[in-house]
Structure formats: structure tokens, C-alpha cells
Amino acid sequence: MPKNTTLKKTKGLPITSVDSSATNASDAKMLFATSSLEMGWQLALAVLIPIFFGSWLDSRYHKYPVWTIIGLVVALLGSYAIVRKTVININHKQSKKDKS
């Protein structure tokens, strides 16, 4: 019998095999989808706020494009941190599901 296969008895029907990897795959897809949606708005804020703030500072202090570039660097660092945190969380949640 293949790995990750369990037997399930159904009412009045013979024993059938159920592949638990299919359930794990759908759980993993759901976890990825919810994490991606959560990460989406975080990335939008992490990118837009520093760039717009930098642009505003440039227009206020006439230092174009210094503050916009600084805002872009802050946005890139923030985006990296958000993606990294999300990947770590997905891996942690997936490993907890695999253990149980």
C-alpha cells in the first residue's frame, strides 16, 4: 500500500482507500492563499507609504529625488521583511500540521 494512504470503511460499502496527501495538499493550498491575501495589503502599505512620504518630503524641501529614493529603499526593505515573515509563518504552520 502506498505511503500516506489510509483505509476508510464506508456504510454498507467495501473498504476504500483514502489518500491523505490530497487532503494535505488542499490544506496547504488554503494556507498559501490566506497568507498571500494577508501579505498583499501589507505589501501595498509597505511600498506606497514610504514612497509617497518621500515624494512629499522632496516637494516640501526641494531635494528631489533624494527622499523618494530613500522611501524606495525603505519600501524594499519593508517588503523583504514582510515576505520573509510570511514564508516563515507558512513553513511553521505547515510543519505543525505535518506533525499532527
Image: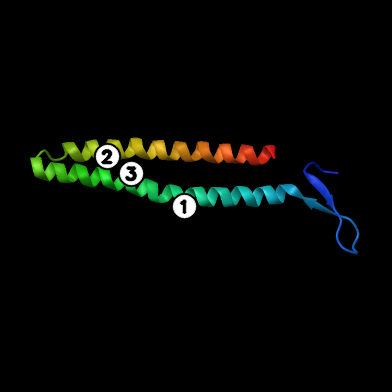
Q: Nearer the viewer, residue 72 or 53?
A: 53
Task: Look at label 2 and name its amino acid.
Answer: Leu
Marks 1/2: CA–CA distance: 23 Å
Q: Position of residue 20 (x, y in %)?
A: 74, 48
Give the SS element for disc 2: helix
User: How far across and down, in percent of the image, does residue 89 sit?
Assistant: 52, 39
Which residue carries the number 1 mark? 37
Q: Nearer the viewer, residue 11 or 67?
A: 11
Residue 46 shows which numbered tag? Answer: 3
Tell me: 12 left or right of 18.
right
The residue sitting at 33% across, 44% down in the picture is 46
- Residue under the point 45% across and 49% down: 38
Between the C-alphas of marks 2 and 3, the distance is 10 Å
Check contact, mark 3 vs mark 1: CB within 8 A. Answer: no
Q: Quadrant of the C terminus?
A: top right
Q: Position of residue 92 (x, y in %)?
A: 57, 37
Marks 2 and 3, the one that precedes in the sequence? 3
Q: Which residue is mark 2?
A: 72
Q: Total number of numbered labels? A: 3
- Which comes sooner in the sequence, label 1 or label 2? 1
**Mark 3 secondary-structure assignment:** helix
Mark closer to the observer (2, 3): 3
Q: Position of residue 76 (x, y in %)?
A: 33, 38
In the figure, 14 relative to 43: above or below?
A: below
Q: Is residue 75 left or right of residue 8?
A: left
Between label 1 and label 2, give the one nearer the viewer.
Answer: 1
Is residue 50 shown left or right of residue 82?
left
Residue at 13% x, 40% y is 64
Q: Amino acid at mark 1?
A: Leu
Query: Which numbered disc covers residue 65?
Result: none
CA neighbours of label 1 inside 10 A, class few (<14), some (14 to 19), many (20+): few
